[in-house]
Amino acid sequence: MITYPGVMPRPRSGSGTREAIHAAATRLFREQGYARTTVREIAAEAGADPALVIRHFRSKELLFLETMHLTLDDEPLLAVPLEQLGERFVEVLLDQEDLSRGVFLALLRGSNEPQIAERLRASHETVFVEPLRARLSGPDADVRARLAGALVGGLLYALWAVGDERLLAAGREELVSRYGPLLQQLLTPASDR
Amino acid sequence: MITYPGVMPRPRSGSGTREAIHAAATRLFREQGYARTTVREIAAEAGADPALVIRHFRSKELLFLETMHLTLDDEPLLAVPLEQLGERFVEVLLDQEDLSRGVFLALLRGSNEPQIAERLRASHETVFVEPLRARLSGPDADVRARLAGALVGGLLYALWAVGDERLLAAGREELVSRYGPLLQQLLTPASDR
DNA sequence: CATGAACTGTCAACTAAGTTGACATGGCCT
DNA sequence: AGGCCATGTCAACTTAGTTGACAGTTCATG
């Protein structure tokens, strides 16, 4: 059995404090973002000493990075024919609001910090660009997928970062039927048909 | 002559310190954002006392709001026929990068603070939505303009907030010719033609 | 079973940063 | 001349992230 030198968090005798801190941080960072959440607040919610938070995670920023992971369950996208991927992707995005919104905003607003910016870049790539590029082909597949990522990100930017009331009020249906086709244009340009 | 009760900044005996603080804050907030810029740093650059910065602007946040104004010279858009507005708008946007980038990012990343969020909302409305809505008509003009704002904001989000290297490398021409038509779709939908 | 290393935890304190209050000064208006 | 107020300085307060000293616990090994 190989032992990894201090890299992996060993279970040891878990009193569960580390997990409590992790959970508290996840909730607070999601709801309040990076800047407005204090280490002392996290510690209080986890019933721990502020110093212990740093002990466990080295710094507030590393704790943030350890808890804020943007994900998208793209399973519902796999079986969708390419011609419907545009609308479907917007649907999936809007339906996972509970999972994504807090993390997306926290990453976006925290991206002043270089490491958080890097995480935002990677998450954007993984969640918004990659699933679409995987379905494209041709020499310009990469650019098109990246523009699609910009388009998709723009919707979340407008809804969540800007908080456009009228768009929020528009409802899922209208957003899907109006914005989806635009995304579709990038996936299957008219010149392809 | 009416005197406004303490609202307008009276010239008085200007030693210019206030202006120096304003200028330093503008530069630093643009280049480093809200969180990474300290009041003490602004004061140092302006050759003033940190307390004086607060004296003049009441708080770091108000100083930020006083200096960070997102604008877009939409004059070059007025004469453009509606059918070319999509590409033209993207062009104008990309050409004003020097003016907009720092402020846009500072507002976006600072939008954890409620007042900065409100400024972002207003700026988005004024700069990205309003110029387009002004050219649209029909019952759905508002929604379409707002979706156009999302689309446009998405491009800046991808380029500047995410920092998508491949998009940055793509160059103005390609971005305009690929992303402009998508915007155009919202301004003049195919069903209109 | 003892023991030392590594982990878990506590407490006080340090540093940086935004802000405030006390106080000084100099110009402008009456 | 006198008073008001904008301008400016300085020290100090508060909050927040982080560190260091120290103590208790657990676990693998001799």
Image (cartoon, coloured by chain):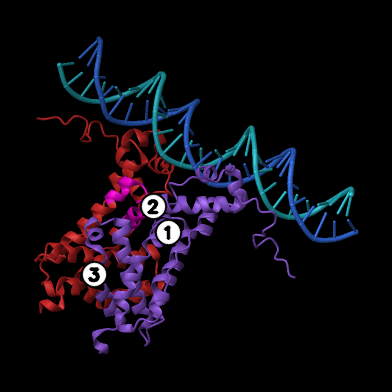
Chain colours: A purple, B red, C cyan, D blue
Q: Which one is nearer the viewer's eye here, D12 or A35? A: A35
Q: Is residue B118 left or right of residue D9?
A: left
Magenta region includes residue B172: no
- The residue sitting at 35% across, 68% down in the picture is A93
Which quarter of the image is occupied by the C terminus of chain B? bottom left
Image quadrant assignment for residue B51: top left
Badge 1 is on which residue?
Answer: A103
- Percent x, y for residue D7? 31, 31
- The residue sitting at 26% across, 79% down in the picture is A185
Query: Which residues lie in the magenta part?
Result: B102-119
Classify 10 Å Cα crowding around label 1: few (below 14), some (14-19), many (20 and above).
many
Badge 3 is on which residue?
Answer: B90
- Percent x, y for residue A95? 35, 66
CA gap between label 2 and label 3 equals: 25 Å
Magenta region includes residue B109: yes
Element type at marker 1? helix
Decide: is B7 above or below A105.
above
